[in-house]
Amino acid sequence: MNDIRVKEYVVHWEDTMRLPDSDMDEKIKGLSVATQLGARVPTGLIIVPEAYCAFVEEGALPKGLGAALASHLSDIERRIRQKIGVFESDKPPLLFSLRCGDKNGDVRLPESMVNIGLAQAEGQAKRSDAFAGILQEEYAMQARQFQGSLLAGAAARNPSHGPFGSAVDELLHYIERIYAHFQELEQAGQHHFNRWLIVQQMVYANWNAQSCSGRAYTRNPRTGQADDFGKYLMQQSGAYLNLTPLEQKKDLRELRDDIPEAYDQLKAFFTELESYYRTPRYVEFVVEDRGLYILQNTRGSCEAR
């Protein structure tokens, strides 16, 4: 991995900016660029493809992966001065999402998992407020979608949904099943996909009335004009974007009135993106209490000639 010291297959998110472009998939590269441009990107970890290679060779998750995850997650806890899974009244809890990197071609990859850390023992006794209940419902919905997105062998492997003793145990559970899915893909002759995994701090589009989740293009893909082209949901997490009928989603231009600070931040980021890439971009974002966070920055499209 060149000049990056990989601690048991795991790289801190901040260190990915030092990885050569050729080593990174599209999602990770896009978030790295967003960070360089000054956008807020939730902190997290990258699990490098070598961990999957070790899984295939050993027939199980590589030894040391759990300890490496524990070490890195502890670093994040110290850095932001929060414990994973503990609910406090004045700020969102520290939880994580797990998702695959970018795909190449028409390859079926597992759904993301959200709110990891919610089920750990330390958080169980502290989950008493309404927001925690919302996160539990979201977790259950996403767990069903994750299960349904797996190939047969991966879906049958270690199907327990907890309770988990720690966020690390929970992560290892889902990583194992994603890797089993990868292995089935390869056994079926499908090789054109990346093996990166992204563990990222949750930010909450449902935290309060000044929060939302959305997806947008830096310009209208049909006309090529720098219009407000995107949709969002107020006080709803991104997990519901695909499930919500189009007519119930709000047009991006309405964000100027709903959360003007976030609208201004997003439009400024679009300008920076197009200046950097010289091409249209597709962006997924969350606004948490008026603050904009970038979750994805990938290639856009433009049909205009």
Image (tube, grey):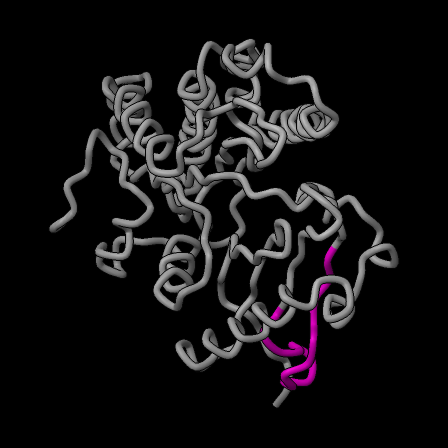
Q: Is residue 230 magenta?
A: yes
Where's the C terminus, which quadrant?
Answer: bottom right
- Residue 14 picture location, percent across and down: 30, 49
The stretch in magenta equals 217-232
Above or below, 194 against 274 in this view is above
* Quarter assignment of residue 240: top right
* Quarter assignment of residue 77: top left
Say how many tags the image has: 0
Residue lying at the far front of the rendered structure? 90
Above or below, 182 against 280 in this view is above
- Residue 254 picture location, percent across and down: 78, 68
Residue closest to the eye, 143 or 156? 143
Residue lying at the far right of the rendered structure? 247
Q: Is residue 96 left or right of residue 16?
A: right
* Quarter assignment of residue 180: top left
Residue closest to the eye, 27 or 264? 264
Q: Is residue 96 left or right of residue 205?
A: left
Residue closest to the eye, 254 or 224? 254
Q: Is residue 116 left or right of residue 172?
A: right
Q: Is residue 259 magenta?
A: no
**Residue depicted at 34% across the width and 37% down the height:** 79
